[in-house]
Image: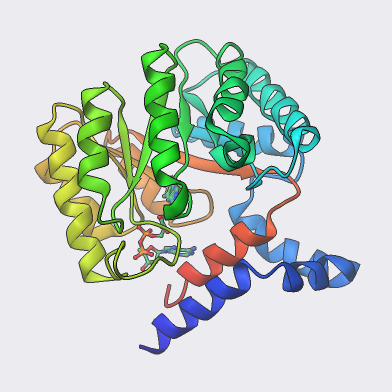
Amino acid sequence: MIASLARRALYALATSTELESVVRAVPPVQDLALSQARRYVAGTTLDEALVTVRRLVGDGLAVSLDLFGEGAADEEALAATVDGYREAAAALADVGGDVYLEIVPSHLGLDLGLDVCRRHVEQLVEFLPAGSRLEISAEEAERTPHIMDLTIALAEAGAPVLATVQANLRRSPGDVDRLLAAGVPVRLVKGAYLEAADIAHRWGDETGVAFVRLAHRIHAGGTPPLLATHDRVLLEALLEALPGAGVEMLLGVREDDARELAGRGVPVRVYAPYGDSWFRYWMRRVAEAQGA
Ligand SMILES: Cc1cc2nc3c(=O)[nH]c(=O)nc-3n(C[C@H](O)[C@H](O)[C@H](O)COP(=O)(O)OP(=O)(O)OC[C@H]3O[C@@H](n4cnc5c(N)ncnc54)[C@H](O)[C@@H]3O)c2cc1C
């Protein structure tokens, strides 16, 4: 109960622009916050991030590199974001290893219109290293229908996309079926956002059970699921039951588990975000680390 309240309170802080402004305004406070956030952050610059990516690849792990940010207010901000992602995609080609680019649709203009976002995402595809994919993040539930439409439109146009489905959302079984019918591989997460009870299962057992059912549903659809969780019990149970399933984890969380699973031959990919907008991401991770 107390952990759940702490989690909700920290989530509220994570989305507080006031708190972020206060922390950002005082350099020593910002430096202290960044020193704590570093564990989860591949770097504040692309060069720093590439050092992290190379370390992970050297450890036998696959990587998804993402540029921090959510929402794009206007075309100018969007152009800068697209340049950043393009630079990241191009740099990945020199790294070698199994490296994907991850994108957050609202960061690439989803709120300005599906066509705007699609146009910008399509520009990135040509910069991906050979054999690489574009992993598409899931965001707040109000954006989910648009993200599903975007993902399927991109897949139908031949883009190598990989979707994220949030187990906590009640709509997710239908989304899984739609994605599988379009031939899109699915990464399953518990869901990082606080959502209303009528659209989402509660955090804890309810979401855990939904995760198990969806993982089986994806597997029954003929595609091995990508299990993006640090929940060791869920992972071991599902890896045993669903041959071919892969694992995805966040940078800085249970890295020993990631290496141990990779050592056993399980394909493990690490999500490695970088950039200057690390504050909200870090606060969400702090909220999730309660009790860890
Ligand atoms: C690769 C990847 C991509 C993701 N992409 C999305 C996305 O696009 N959209 C979205 O909504 N969510 C996304 N998430 C986040 C996800 O929805 C959960 O919020 C997050 O993974 C925490 O849930 P968990 O499954 O690890 O389970 P939990 O029950 O939260 O954690 C299981 C155990 O892992 C450990 N742990 C978890 N978090 C931390 C931490 N921060 N620090 C230390 N220990 C920790 C603890 O020991 C905990 O008991 C992603 C997660 C991963 C791994």
Residue 225: where, in percent of width, then height?
A: 24, 36
Name the residue rendered at 44%, 38% in the picture: 147
Q: Is residue 260 visible?
A: yes
93 horizontally vs 82: left or right:
left
Quarter where residue 79 is shown: top right
* Residue at the spot 42% in from the left edge and 47% down from the top edge: 249
Q: Is residue 98 above or below residue 177?
A: above
Q: Is residue 55 visible?
A: no
Is 232 placed above or below 121 here?
below
User: Looking at the image, which residue is at 35% across and 88% down?
Assistant: 1
Residue 256 spot, x, y in % from top left: 42, 53
- Tally of numbered tags: 0
Horizontal side, residue 22 vs residue 60: left or right: right
Nearest the eye: 30 or 182: 182
Relative to residue 76, is residue 174 drawn left or right?
Answer: left
User: What is the quadrant of residue 178 in the picture?
Assistant: top left
The quadrant of the picture occupied by the C terminus is bottom left
Residue at the location (27% across, 22% down)?
A: 182
Q: Against 5, is 180 above or below?
A: above
Looking at the picture, tell me which residue is in the foreground, 233 or 197: 197
Residue 274 x %, y %: 67, 43
Q: Where in the image, quadrant-wise, is ligand 1 located? A: bottom left
**Colour scheme of the rendered structure:** rainbow
Rendered location of residue 243, percent (x, y): 14, 34
Q: In front here: 147 or 42?
A: 147
Vertical placement of 262 versus 95: above or below?
below
